[in-house]
Image (cartoon, rainbow, N blue to C red):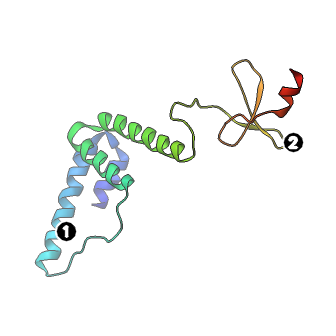
Amino acid sequence: MEMAFIALKGNPYRADEHITTMRQEIVSTLVTLMEANIPVSVPKKERTLTDVLQEAAAESASMLGSNAVAKGVSFFRDVKENISKKKDGIPQDAEQIIIYEDEETGELFFIDEDGNDVVCDENGFPLDDDGDDEDE
């Protein structure tokens, strides 16, 4: 199995061949252990959504090829990022902005489309300026 892993790292374009070899060696190892009456147990680790999706991506790679799965993994990362944003209260259609910190005041801000500095919180939500009402 170690040789197949080294070969996989050396030439990832031949992954299908190396992964098939690894699967065969794992099954052979399990058969040998079972024939010798050595108990083999399933790990007790709790499976998370990430675990399930990674397993699905790996299985899909063996069926569809790595290019199709790379797109699927990219989609999975986008979904996971959107879920994280939702937990943080960031709208799903929010634009990605770069948030800067003023070294003197410590205020956070971003630069809008017009080139103006907009004071915001750590998630990029603009803070209300009370001073604007006095100018009207």
Q: Is residue 3 above or below residue 33?
A: above
Residue position marked by numbered label 2 in the rendering: 105
Q: Is residue 134 above or below residue 12?
A: above
Instruction: Identify the residue at image location x=11%, y=77%.
Output: 35
Quadrant where the C terminus lies? top right
Please, what is the three-letter code of the amino acid marked with disc 1? Thr
Whole-percent x and y of residue 115? 75, 20
* Between 17 and 122, the one nearer to me in the picture: 122
Q: Is residue 32 left or right of residue 86?
A: left
Q: How many dots with numbers?
A: 2
How many other residues sit within 10 Å of disc 2, few (<14), some (14-19) or many (≥20)?
few
Residue 42 lies in quadrant: bottom left
Whole-percent x and y of residue 102? 82, 38
Residue position marked by numbered label 1 in the rendering: 29
Evaluate if marks 2 and 1 touch, with contact meaning CB atoms under 8 Å apart. Answer: no
Whole-percent x and y of residue 48? 37, 58
Please, what is the three-letter code of the amino acid marked with disc 2? Thr
Q: Is residue 68 above or below residue 17?
A: above
Instruction: Identify the residue at image location x=17%, y=63%.
Output: 27
Quadrant where the N terminus lies? bottom left
Q: Is residue 114 above or below residue 2?
A: above
